[in-house]
Every structure is written in structure tokens, then in C-alpha cells.
Image: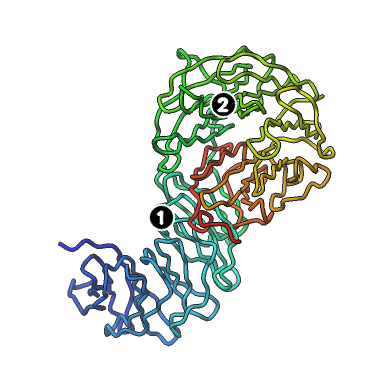
């Protein structure tokens, strides 16, 4: 028995309906659909044939296009079995092919295991475009839709992303965070002059996307589905973990890469009204997560087993932000801010209260701590009145800070760049993200790419040395920046709903939005050593 990996149908010029089947025996066979008679073989190929599609050229020739594990795309005359073109350009296994029209051209699109996507002219047998930013993992499915300037390529990837490209130019237009666990299928259709895509994935959901203006039609979700906070941790042993919580859902721990559930965080059966999360590595305990609640509660769990370590004294009012890090003396500390316009500092190891910072005059919505560099033990906090305050976590003494922003500050983050340079980031209204050196807060520089209020920022140092920031907001977009060059690195990802929280680590990043969560691993291009 031959394992089939692809099947396509066509109508030959003489009116014969045929099916083209490919599989593990390195051949493509053409069959008469009416009689079941085998007509001829397209091949042989030099390796396993993974994908096939068919098309009719302008002169009426019906062709079959096959994608092979040797990286080649072959074009065959489906009527007589002659090879017309052998197309090279992929450096990894071709996993999917599809055919469509770009103006007056008949084209094929092929995707491979490395995430590379190429567009070919079928009549001339030459490459038209490479979708150069497609490197989001194995291309698991692709489809073509529209025509002319409205033609689009839609790809689905093993990391859960659905990407959209202009067929005529190869320019990327949108990236959607679609399905945790991977995208299994996509298709495109024109409905009442509206080009839409449908994607299905490992999460068991089907999502309809407006391909033209990037408006995913997210299903309605009840209040219990709202996700408000995420955090990530990389234990010394075992996989990277993601913690997500919010609304009535409490908090649950999952494998960051696979999405497999590990356990649910509980406190003697009490319901957790999680509003904020932060993780740390605590000596003699291991990885821990701290959850701040709408009811003012603060609790800490050991992360790999989900066992409760301790509770901290309740705060007055809702907790809106928590952060963990080290003071200048090396002590691990916990910060919590919220509706009472203060930031409270605890000793993370002992649970002892250390001090309360009272510099804000409105709800504290964001906190972060510097980690290393020339200025350790410095806290950054932002409030609803647009103030960003910088202060010493050991003494509570305020330090120089950037000028006040308009609107509210819902996100702050810190990072250490090459040369032990410590920088901070803050996100405000109108998509404004500012980055400044803690030694020179007056020289804040913008990071562009977001369009509405910025609600989440996170930073990570990758194994190759890059220091990245990830930001998201109410425009449902997620943007990645290289903090050394301050350049946007990829096409923004589009989420089904507004972003509420982002967490990042060396393995990848997780986004919480109002309809759920989406997890990503860094692509190989970003994991490579930094240029220069």
C-alpha cells in the first residue's frame, strides 16, 4: 500500500477528468476519474513527493505541479506526462504547492519546511518572487485567492500563524496569530466582493479572516474567556512554560512550545481573579509565579508542580500590575501596583513587606525592574495620568525620568543592551512607544509600528545575542523591534482581539488578548548571531 500525501484533479483538453496522486513511492500517477484507469506516471522524482496541484495555462495546456522533499518543484504536462520545467530555489523539503492567477499569468506558489515561500511563472518556468519574511516555521498549508492587484497568497505555519501576501508583488500585508499548536488548513474565497480566508488548526477552531483589511471575525466569547495576563519561565530542567490567566478562568500552566496543559493554579479551591502575573527563579524552590488579583490578593506558586508557596498581605484595591527582579543588594523583590496609586515592595523569598512607593497620583498600571547592567535595582512605573516614574527599589528615592506622556501608561519594560547599557521602554496612547537610556532619560527615542494605545511590552535576549522588544495594543497588532537598531523586524502580527499582556523569553513569546492566548517561538533568522 502506498501512502498518499497529495491529490489534485483536472479536466484535460480532450474532456477527460483526471486525478493526480502523489505519495511516498516518489511518483505522481494520473488516473481517469470515470473509469479508474491509470493513464501514465509523472516522474520519477528523486525523493518523496509531498504536494501536488494542477493548472491550465493560457494556451490550454493542463499542467500538474509537484513539490518534492529534494527541494524541487516540477511542472508536467498532465495529458502526456512530459516534464516541462524543473524549478529550483528551495533549500529544504517542499511541503505545499498551490496554483492561481496573477494578472495574465498562471502562477504556482510553493512552501517548504524552513518557512520559505516562492512564486513561479508556470508558462516560463521562472521564479517571480520570494516571500522573504515568511520564516515562521514549517509551511503546513497555503492557498491563493483574488486576481490582479487584489490577488493574495495565504500561508499557514506549524507555529500557529496565518500570513497574507500580495500575489503580484510578494509584499507581506498581514500576519494573524491564528491557532495555538499549528495551522492545519487554509482556503480563500471571494464573498460579495470581500476576500476572506478560513483557517483551521490544532486548537479545534475554524477562524474566518478578512484578508483585505486584516479584520479577523473572532467568535463571541463570554466574560469567562477573557485573558488578562501572561508570563513565561524557563526552568533549569524541562521545557519553557507559559502561565495565562484572567477573568473567571483563574490561571493555568502550559508548555510554551507545544501548548500542552500542565496544571491549574489553585488555592484551597478558591477562585482566582487574576489580573497580573510575573515569574522568577527562587533559590531552594525553583521557578515560581506570582499572581495579583482584582480582589487585592497576591499569591505565589511553585511553577512546575503548581503547589502554593505563600500568600502576601492583601493590598487595598485591585492589583493591576506585578513585577519581580533584584534590588541593588541582590535581594529578590516583588512589586505590586494598582488602584491605590502606590507600588508596594516585598521580599520575594520571605514574604516580608519592605516599603511602599507613593510618588504616583493615579492608578498604577505598569511596573518593571532593571536586571543587571550599570543601573541594577531600579524600578519603572507608569500610571493612568501619563506619568512614568523611575525610582530606587531599595530606598524609594525618585530618579530622573522622561517627560510626561499624554494619556495613560499601561506598559513599561527594561533591557540590558551591549556595553551594559540599561534602557527602559514605555507605551502610551496613539501607539507611542518610547525607549530611553536610564542615564539619559531626556533623550527618549520612538519605536514605531503600533497605531493605538499600547497595552503591553516585553523584552528578551536571544541565544544569538539579539535583544528584542515585543509590543501590542488596542489595534490588535503585535510588533517586534531590535532594540540595538530600533528597527521593526517583521510584518506585524494581527490578533483576533485587543492585546492585554505580552511575556517573552529566549524560547519565544506569548500574547494574551481578549479572546484567548497565542504562543510563538522565535524563527531561525532571529536566533542567529546579531549582525556585526
What is the secondary structure assignment of the residue under circle 2?
helix
Query: Measured along the vertical axis of the image, is residue 264 above or below residue 259?
Result: above
- Residue 23 sits in quarter: bottom left
Image quadrant in which the N terminus is located: bottom left
Q: Residue furthest left?
A: 1
Point out the tag, 1 or 2, that comes first from the N-terminus.
1
Image quadrant where residue 514 sits:
top right
Q: Residue furthest bottom?
A: 59
Reply above or below: 87 against 464: below
Give percent across and percent down for residue 27.
23, 73
**Which label number is shown at residue 247?**
2
Q: Position of residue 3 (x, y in %)?
A: 21, 61
Q: Is residue 48 left or right of residue 379?
A: left
Q: Is residue 392 above or below residue 133?
A: above
- Check disc 1 and report its element: helix, strand or loop: strand
Front residue of this view, candidates 157 and 39: 157
**Circle 1 residues within 10 Å: few <14, some 14–19, many ≥20:** some
Quadrant where the image shows the C terminus: bottom right
Label 2 packing within 10 angstroms: few (<14), some (14-19), many (20+): many
Q: For this rendering, which residue is in front, 53 or 260?
A: 260
Question: Along the horizontal axis of the image, is 457 left or right of 184?
Answer: right
Q: Which residue is mark 1?
A: 185
Which of the colour schemes (rainbow, by chain, secondary structure, one colour) is used?
rainbow
Amino acid at each position: 500500500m502506498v501512502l498518499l500525501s497529495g491529490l489534485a484533479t483536472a479536466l484535460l483538453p480532450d474532456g477527460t477528468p483526471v486525478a493526480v496522486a502523489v505519495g511516498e513511492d516518489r511518483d505522481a500517477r494520473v488516473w481517469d476519474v470515470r473509469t479508474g484507469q491509470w493513464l501514465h506516471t509523472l516522474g520519477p522524482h528523486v525523493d518523496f513527493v509531498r504536494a501536488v496541484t494542477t493548472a491550465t495555462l493560457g494556451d490550454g495546456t493542463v499542467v500538474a505541479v509537484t513539490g518534492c522533499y529534494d527541494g524541487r518543484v516540477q511542472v508536467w504536462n498532465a495529458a502526456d506526462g512530459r516534464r516541462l520545467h524543473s524549478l529550483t530555489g528551495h533549500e529544504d523539503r517542499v511541503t505545499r504547492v498551490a496554483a492561481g492567477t496573477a494578472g495574465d499569468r498562471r502562477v504556482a506558489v510553493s512552501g517548504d519546511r524552513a518557512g520559505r515561500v516562492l512564486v513561479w511563472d508556470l508558462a516560463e518556468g521562472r521564479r517571480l518572487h520570494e516571500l522573504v519574511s515568511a520564516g515562521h516555521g514549517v509551511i503546513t498549508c497555503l492557498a491563493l485567492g483574488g486576481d490582479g492587484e487584489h490577488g493574495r497568497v495565504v500561508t499557514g505555519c506549524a507555529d500557529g500563524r496565518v500570513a497574507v501576501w500580495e500575489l503580484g508583488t510578494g509584499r507581506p500585508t498581514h500576519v494573524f496569530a491564528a491557532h495555538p499548536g499549528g495551522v492545519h488548513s487554509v482556503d480563500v474565497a471571494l464573498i460579495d466582493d470581500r476576500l476572506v480566508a478560513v483557517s483551521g488548526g490544532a486548537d479545534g477552531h475554524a477562524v474566518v479572516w478578512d484578508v483585505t483589511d486584516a479584520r479577523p471575525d473572532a467568535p463571541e466569547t463570554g466574560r469567562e474567556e477573557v485573558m488578562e495576563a501572561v508570563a513565561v519561565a524557563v526552568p533549569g530542567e524541562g521545557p519553557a512554560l507559559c502561565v495565562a490567566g484572567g477573568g473567571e478562568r483563574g490561571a493555568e500552566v502550559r508548555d510554551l512550545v507545544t501548548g500542552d496543559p500542565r496544571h491549574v493554579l489553585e488555592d484551597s479551591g478558591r477562585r482566582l481573579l487574576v489580573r497580573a502575573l510575573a515569574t522568577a527563579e527562587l533559590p531552594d524552590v525553583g521557578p515560581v509565579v506570582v499572581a495579583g488579583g482584582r480582589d487585592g490578593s497576591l499569591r505565589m506558586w511553585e511553577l512546575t508542580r503548581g503547589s502554593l508557596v505563600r500568600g502576601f498581605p492583601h493590598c487595598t484595591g485591585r492589583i493591576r500590575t506585578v513585577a519581580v527582579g533584584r534590588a541593588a543588594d541582590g535581594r529578590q523583590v516583588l512589586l505590586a501596583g494598582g488602584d491605590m496609586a502606590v507600588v508596594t515592595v516585598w521580599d520575594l523569598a520571605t514574604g516580608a513587606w519592605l516599603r511602599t512607593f507613593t510618588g504616583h497620583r493615579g492608578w498604577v498600571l505598569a511596573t518593571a525592574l532593571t536586571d543587571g547592567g550599570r543601573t541594577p535595582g531600579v524600578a519603572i512605573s507608569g500610571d493612568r495620568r501619563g506619568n512614568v516614574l523611575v525610582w530606587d527599589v531599595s530606598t524609594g528615592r525618585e530618579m530622573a525620568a522622561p517627560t510626561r506622556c499624554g494619556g495613560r501608561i499601561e506598559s513599561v519594560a527594561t533591557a540590558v543592551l551591549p556595553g551594559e547599557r540599561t534602557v527602559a521602554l514605555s507605551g502610551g496612547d496613539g501607539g507611542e512607544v518610547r525607549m530611553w537610556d536610564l542615564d539619559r532619560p531626556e533623550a527618549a527615542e520612538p519605536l514605531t509600528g503600533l497605531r493605538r494605545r499600547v497595552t503591553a511590552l516585553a523584552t528578551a535576549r536571544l541565544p544569538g545575542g539579539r535583544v528584542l522588544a515585543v509590543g501590542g495594543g488596542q489595534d490588535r497588532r503585535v510588533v517586534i523591534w531590535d532594540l540595538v537598531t530600533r528597527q521593526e523586524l517583521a510584518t506585524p502580527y494581527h490578533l483576533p482581539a485587543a492585546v492585554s499582556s505580552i511575556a517573552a523569553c529566549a524560547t519565544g513569546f506569548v500574547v494574551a488578548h481578549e479572546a484567548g492566548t497565542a504562543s510563538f517561538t522565535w524563527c531561525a533568522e532571529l536566533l542567529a548571531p546579531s549582525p556585526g
